[in-house]
Image: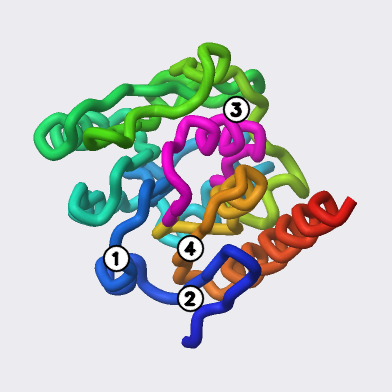
């Protein structure tokens, strides 16, 4: 499919593992790929909330190939992962990038389930960087822990694992450079934050429904920026 261009954003519908290597170097890759999680259980709570069923239907519980995190294609990589993926991800970061940090999104409204684990009150992401691409921002922005409410209802945009706008705005404030790629774009939260931060954005999403949502959200973000520039 021909990419969709919206202002400084270019969106691709297709497979990340095929498309990302062909898109060349970006200052930062920001990824929220499929987590490796146990997708059974949940009891009565799960019956009332079909989010986990959607995760299974969309194969968002099977993990991802970490070879897509390539230090030759990005100055820095910010990668979300489940607790059970951290050992491999941290090993990759230490072996292939100059430095890295383990960061935490602490949810102020975690789901009231544990499923034979700890409650999902935090999510982890690793920020790894090469020389010259160290984290940006002032002291107030250079925090490794962010206490932010998890999206509910319409703020999920029909996606079971949408990241909140406030979190992605904080993360993009820590990204050095002007070009950002998200190979697992989902509904476009990274793209919206990148546009608002004045950066160029490239997104890849394989699910047509989520892709269309991302197109609509990023179109609105670009229009918002253009109105602000014209004011």
Crowd band around label 3 with a 10 angstrom C-alpha radius: few (<14), some (14–19), many (20+): few
Q: Is residue 211 above or below residue 187?
A: below
Highlighted range, magenta: 161-181
What residue does disc 1 label?
A: 24
What SS does tag 3 mark?
loop
The answer to whether residue 121 shows anywhere in this view is no
Question: Could you give the CA–CA distance between mark 1 and mark 4, rounded to whole angstroms?
Answer: 13 Å
Residue 152 higher or lower than 72, as above or below: above
Between marks 4 and 3 in the image, the one whose residue lies nearer the viewer = 4
The CA span between labels 1 and 2 is: 17 Å
Where residue 153 sits in the image (x, y, percent)? 75, 44
* Residue 129 quadrant: top left
**Residue at mark 4 to residue at mark 3: CA–CA distance:** 29 Å
Please name which of the two marks, 4 or 2, marks the residue nearer to the observer: 4
Task: Tell me if mark 4 has few (under 14), some (14-19) or many (20+) residues whose alpha carbon lies within 10 angstroms of its own.
Answer: many
- Would you name the residue on which mark 3 appears? 111
Residue marked by disc 2: 13
Residue 75, numbered circle:
none
The residue at the point 71 percent across, 60 percent down is: 222
- Quadrant housing residue 23: bottom left
Q: Position of residue 196 (x, y in %)?
A: 66, 46
Identify the residue position indicated by label 4 in the image.
203
Of marks 4 and 2, which one's residue comes earlier in the chain?
A: 2
Q: Is residue 170 above or below residue 29?
A: above
Q: Residue furthest front?
A: 230
SS at circle 4: strand
- Which of discs 3 and 2 lies nearer the camera? The answer is 2
The CA distance from mark 4 to mark 2 is 9 Å
For marks 1 and 4 on the same chain, the one whose residue lies earlier in the sequence: 1
| Residue drawn at x 59%, y 56% as measured from the top left | 188
């Amino acid at each position: 499919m021909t990419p969709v261009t919206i202002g400084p954003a270019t969106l691709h519908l297709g497979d990340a593992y095929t498309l990302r290597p062909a898109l060349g170097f970006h200052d930062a890759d920001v990824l929220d790929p499929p987590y490796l999680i146990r997708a059974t259980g949940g009891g009565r709570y799960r019956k009332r909330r079909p989010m986990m069923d959607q995760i299974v239907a969309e194969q968002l519980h099977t993990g991802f190939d970490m070879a897509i995190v390539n230090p030759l294609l990005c100055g820095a990589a910010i990668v979300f992962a489940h607790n059970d993926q951290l050992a491999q991800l941290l090993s990759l970061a230490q072996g292939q990038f100059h430095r890295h940090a383990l960061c935490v999104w602490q949810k102020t409204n975690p789901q009231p389930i544990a499923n034979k684990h700890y409650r999902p009150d935090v999510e982890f992401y690793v920020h790894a960087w090469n020389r010259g691409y160290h984290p940006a921002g002032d002291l107030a922005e250079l925090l490794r822990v962010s206490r932010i409410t998890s999206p509910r209802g319409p703020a999920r945009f029909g996606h079971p694992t949408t990241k909140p706008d406030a979190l992605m705005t904080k993360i993009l404030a820590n990204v050095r450079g002007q070009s950002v790629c998200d190979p697992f774009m989902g509904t476009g939260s990274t793209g919206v934050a990148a546009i608002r931060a004045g950066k160029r954005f490239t997104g890849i999403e394989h699910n047509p429904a989520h892709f269309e949502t991302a197109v609509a959200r990023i179109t609105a973000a670009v229009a918002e920026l253009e109105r602000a520039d014209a004011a």
